[in-house]
Amino acid sequence: GQQVMQIPQYQHVQEGEDFTTYCNSSTTLSNIQWYKQRPGGHPVFLIQLVKSGEVKKQKRLTFQFGEAKKNSSLHITATQTTDVGTYFCSTDSWGKLQFGAGTQVVVTP
Amino acid sequence: DGGITQSPKYLFRKEGQNVTLSCEQNLNHDAMYWYRQDPGQGLRLIYYSQIVNDFQKGDIAEGYSVSREKKESFPLTVTSAQKNPTAFYLCASSSGLRETQYFGPGTRLLVL
């Protein structure tokens, strides 16, 4: 089964607004990876977080790994229509990557 | 131009037929994977291979088979035993089982 839970499952966002999606676990994680899948496309690797409390930014995207390494968040500022898609987190579980169910993001112009 | 290729992009199958989906990578990755994705759903692992001539069942292996005779290739056969095969199939590869995965463009299978 999945080791990480992603919330929310769906996110409707008005263009220009900010939003945050979360990836949570009941156990300590060794790392977190984030992927983005555009509608009709395939997942593409965005970033990996390894250290407790780590924060990384990619333009309008801010990724954070919790201090206890049990959760991670992806925050998008000033959402654009190009941000539409499904965001997956994944983590090393039982020797291989396990993916969360994803947060599907819909952007309203 | 390195990457992962999957063919065909779209595939139609009649009920009762086996069909094989191709996946090739030139990234020199040891590990390869097959996932199934249904509309609006996440990724479900079908099979994975850590090394040539070895592969393991994932979460939904029933009705599928794979082979790993070459490092570059990991074909997936959807057999007639798979009762609901219509889905989007994604192949991925990585340098190791715990490493970042790189996905191919996918194959959409439709059973007629």
Image: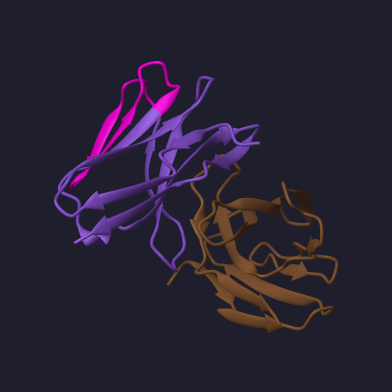
Chain colours: A purple, B brown
In this rendering, position of residue B109 left or right of residue B26: right
In this rendering, position of residue B108 left or right of residue B83: left
- The reply to whether the magenta stretch includes residue B21 is no
Counting every numbered tag in the picture gives 0
Task: Identify the image quadrant of the C terminus of chain A.
Answer: bottom left
Indicate the position of residue A66 as horizontal and vertical percent values.
36, 22
Q: Nearer the viewer, residue B106 or B60?
A: B60
Q: Nearer the viewer, residue A45 or A26?
A: A26
Residue B1, quarter of picture: bottom left
Residue A76 seen in render: yes
Residue at the top extreme of this rendering: A68
Indicate the position of residue B71 as horizontal and vertical percent values.
67, 62
Residue B85, above or below A29: below
Residue A73, quarter of picture: top left
- The reply to whether the magenta stretch includes residue A58 is yes
Residue A36, above or below B65: above
- Residue drawn at the location 76% of the way across and 77% of the way down: B19
Indicate the position of residue B102 as horizontal and vertical percent values.
49, 56
- Residue drawn at the location 42% of the way across and 26% of the way down: A71
Task: Identify the image quadrant of the N terminus of chain A.
Answer: top right
- Residue drawn at the location 54% of the way across and 51% of the way down: B42
Residue B8 seen in render: no
- Residue drawn at the location 31% of the way across and 21% of the way down: A53
Q: What range is drawn magenta here?
A: A51-71
Q: Nearer the viewer, residue A90 or B71?
A: A90
Indicate the position of residue A43 as horizontal and vertical percent values.
45, 57
